[in-house]
Image: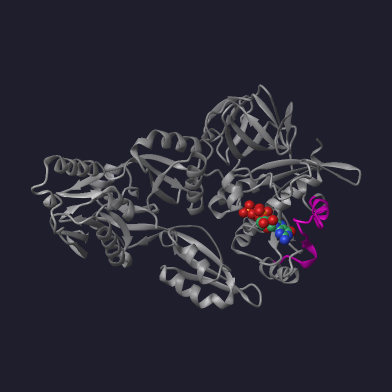
Amino acid sequence: FPVDKIRNFSIIAHIDHGKSTLADRLLEMTGAIAKTDRNKQVLDKLQVERERGITVKAQTASLFYKHKGQTYLLNLIDTPGHVDFSYEVSRSISACQGVLLIVDANEGIQAQTVANFYLAFEAQLTIIPVINKIDLKNADPDRVEKQLEKMFDIPREECIRISAKLGTNVDQVLEEIVKRIPPPTAKLGEPFKALVFDSTFDHYRGVVASIALFSGQVCKGDKIVSAHLGKTYEVNELGILRPDEQPTERLFAGQVGYVIAGMKEVKDAQIGDTFYLQKHPVEALPGFKAAKCMVFAGIYPTDQSEYPSLRSAVEKLTLNDSSVKVQKDSSLALGAGWRLGFLGLLHMEVFNQRLEQEYNASVIVTAPTVPYKTILASPKLIKEYGQEVVTIVNPTNFPEKSSVVEYLEPMVMGTIISPDDFTGKIMSLCQSRRAVQKNMVYIDDHRVMMQYLFPLNEIVVDFYDELKSMSSGYASFDYEDAGYEPAELIKIDFLLNGNPVEELTTIVHKDRAYNTGKAMCIRLKESIPRQMFEIAVQAAIGSKIIARETIKAYRKNVLAKCYGGDITRKMKLLKKQAEGKKKMRRIGNIDVPKEAFINVLKRK
Ligand code: GTP
């Protein structure tokens, strides 16, 4: 296919602004899919994606489009719609020369519009602004054009007003893709070099990698190498995506397609890696990063007998998602399980939802934590860890203050866009989360954009829900990684009658110590049943007790009512108690039911 007739583009948008709907229309109008079943959203394949209306995994389609007697090959590279996947978004985008930036005509610019715009802008791509949903009764495309001009310097004449739902002006979008986006600068005569921008696992054929060819060509039987992993594979099959796989003989520079090359795990085709021919090594494309996990949580089967089936479900799910970090873990109370690392909160939620929906797994998920770091001072510890800066994975290994230079916590830059009626409330919410305001601008007469530097830990649990509810659903939120900053962190231990309960040990910021200690003691008190004796539930920092609750002694003896009664009844009662004890963990002389741990450890 002549390179000057190729256009590679992505659609980027805030969630729900109509990316999938527009993609479907483009596919229909170019004959890639039949015009049946409107709103089917062919590109979103996962069940959870359809249910939540968000795109998790990038999908790609090659479209043939006739314009003024010429046939063009338009490669639509679908990008995941959420901030958690921003590395995937930026890699997919780097396979393109242009993007369609969709903005909802009613909602206007939202937090992810801003993030996505800058990703495309920094990659120096042609940006075609598309204002969608003009069919809505309260659509206000004039206002959206003003916002785009004010925020991004986009001239109004450049905006295309469409209704993806009804198909209004979508033909114009196709025309403008051809007119405005430049063809790729592909070098046919040079050795094969391709960017891996997505990979999926197929049970029968192994890994299917999506690639964009920057130079050269590749065909069946070629031996290819992944630059960062240094592994060699033989190409068994390749072709284009329409959006289903359509095998071809060869792929050429400028094209986008798939290869199957006997790779066993998605880790073999990492997003951002470069493929080249074994016989013609080339320099790897810049910007490769391994996925970085920002949120960790423990996952345990509700019942240990379900461990094997949960293990197989976790394995299957991670086959298709190389960004989830999996580590075996075990808790005295909850048994064998895993500690999983995720790119962000949505990523974690989607993963859990898929475990439950697709594999019918019943799981306990612990409260999410963030990766803290310490800079060690003690030479002994430095030698033990083999390095000075250590990421703390398990709170029980948290090094004491006397042996560290400082503790560090992960930070994020959060962007909030909201109608200005809620500004005051949002500001106090952010302040209560230890956030520092960095920027505040009006994007039009009634809407503000605020930027805050947040400790990640302060937003992992319920920040987004609270923001949504205090703004009646109008505020949007997005965040990006902002490195690490020094923080005064403290380890809290929990004690039952003086005996530490290891699995409850928690690391918190010093300003949160008292409240966290108190809240967890109350939850423990509520979930441990009374026993024959009084139990002190305490939270401690080192040897200092910061909170205490008391579980009063159980007054009546269970056997009391059996006195004089017949022995079999007594035995039955004792047996019942013994069975109950199997699900107990003994701490000192106290029996704690598994449910108590679940109540305290679980996400609220
Ligand atoms: P993500 O996959 O989360 O990024 O969402 P999306 O941007 O793909 O949004 P999607 O296409 O799923 O559309 C979101 C909702 O808006 C759906 O209910 C669509 O039917 C609706 N929608 C999309 N385009 C239009 C439009 O032009 N007019 C109207 N009225 N509704 C639309």
Vertical placement of residue 137 versus 30, above or below: below
- For the point 63% across and 48% down, which residue is it? 79
Given residues 514 and 523, the one toward you in this image is 523
> Magenta includes 191?
no
Residue 201: horizontal and vertical position, in percent?
Answer: 57, 34
Give the magenta part as a residue range. Answer: 153-177
Residue 76 occupies which quadrant of the picture? top right
Residue 497: horizontal and vertical position, in percent?
Answer: 15, 56
Q: Is residue 129 visible?
A: no
- For the point 50% across and 67% down, which residue is it? 467
Residue 463: horizontal and vertical position, in percent?
Answer: 46, 64
Q: How is the image coloured?
A: one colour
Vertical placement of residue 252 versus 430, above or below: above
> Magenta includes 168?
yes
Given residues 80 and 178, the one toward you in this image is 80
**Furthest residue toward top:** 221
Ligand 1 found in image quarter: bottom right
Residue 422 occupies which quadrant of the picture? bottom right
Vertical placement of residue 240 versus 581, above or below: above
- For the point 42% across and 34% down, which residue is it? 309
Given residues 192 and 328, the one toward you in this image is 328
Screen quadrant of the N terminus: top right
Left or right of 111, for residue 30: right
Left or right of 309, for residue 479: right
Q: Is residue 438 visible?
A: yes
- For the point 63% across and 59% down, which residue is it? 14
Residue 113 occupies which quadrant of the picture? bottom right
Screen quadrant of the C terminus: bottom left
- Disc tally is 0
Left or right of 303, for residue 242: right
Residue 174: horizontal and vertical position, in percent?
Answer: 80, 51
